[in-house]
Image: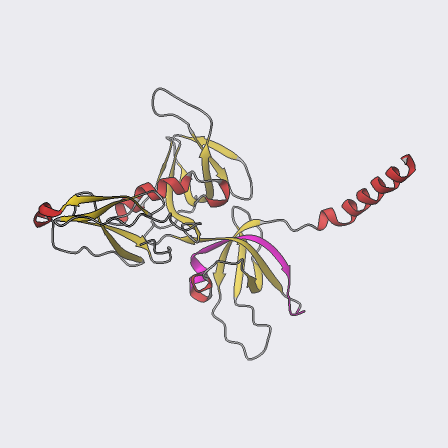
Amino acid sequence: MFKTNIITLIFILSISFCFGSQLPTNYYYKVTHVPIYCITTPCSQYRVHKVNTQDPEIVIENFVFPNGVEQNYFLLQEANTAIFYGTIIANRNGYNVNDFKVKRVYKQLPQGDALSSTDKYYMFGSSGIVCITTPCPSISAILLNIETATNVNDVKQPYETNVPLFDTNWLFQKQFESEENRLIGVGTINNQWEVIVSSSYVRLPDPISSCPALPLLKCQGGHVTVFERDSNRCLANPQCSNDNDTRACILSIPACPTGYDLVSYTSISTCPAYNCDAYFLTKTY
């Protein structure tokens, strides 16, 4: 029995030694589309660069996407506003070029600020520090692919200023989701230990799972069904409300800037409530 166990252990260690170093390593890569015209294959129109590094760009022939990804948001020119988390693999057709196996996809929110030369790519989490006064370094800014972290007092996003009717509650939750669902912020840490974000990338699809089903209310005459919108952009808390006050609602319909779609629902006030959601986000109602 002892001899058998020794042989089994040696076999397992041999397998680990032979294959462990070959296991794929995932990193975060910024994607660029190069609009070249080809008459033969392969025709490699994509480049990826490992963010926060000086590594050279890698030429990519094809992307292998996970299930559930709307690929139209990540191909051709749309790829220029994407970050992929994944690994470089050999071309599946046998050509002497690289493919890229995508594990997670992130899309840049439109209408951010211009990038700064000092900007880096971060994810954010709790630093574990709790204060009774401010400023307080309660946020950990983690450099992607480097894994070093800096405790900061605040993360300042540009979208509330740049995009009317932007859902800041949704974006705030994206900063502190579980690690695989958090947003990526591109920004610079200033002298006040604040991350000044130029632009953010959100993981798609969003929301990751479908919104909960809502009960179908049968409101009496003179009443309408009203809702709240939660931090996942889902409608919640349906109620019946007297619609006598709808005459006080503003009748004009707002407009959203380029890259955003206008969505609306009947709010608790019985008036329409509007939000500007990025065009690539899943419609939730």
Q: Is residue 281 magenta?
A: no
User: Which residue is drawn at the image coordinates 21% and 48% (left, top)?
Assistant: 225
Q: How is the image coloured?
A: secondary structure
Is residue 92 part of the magenta span, yes or no?
yes
Q: With 200 as the anchor, is 271 left or right in this view?
A: left
Q: Quarter of the image containing the C terminus?
A: bottom left
Looking at the image, which is closer to me, 87 or 58?
87
Q: Nearer the viewer, residue 121 or 93?
A: 93
Q: Would residue 95 be found to the left or right of residue 12 on screen?
A: left
- Where residue 238 appears, as percent x and y from the top left, is 26, 45
Vertical position of residue 134 compared to residue 46: above or below: above
Image point (26%, 55%), residue name:
263
Taking the image as shown, residue 204 lies to the left or right of residue 255, namely right
Q: Position of residue 140 (x, y in %)?
A: 46, 33
For the record, the magenta segment spans 78-95
Q: Compared to 141, does 240 lie above or below?
A: below
Q: Which image quarter is the N terminus in?
A: top right
Q: How many marks?
A: 0
Q: Is residue 45 above or below residue 222?
A: below
The image quadrant that residue 173 belongs to is: top left
- Above or below: residue 88 compared with residue 239: below
From the viewer's perspective, tell me whether residue 65 is left or right of residue 237.
Answer: right
Q: Nearer the viewer, residue 215 or 134?
A: 215
- Residue 203 horizontal/vertical position (percent): 45, 50
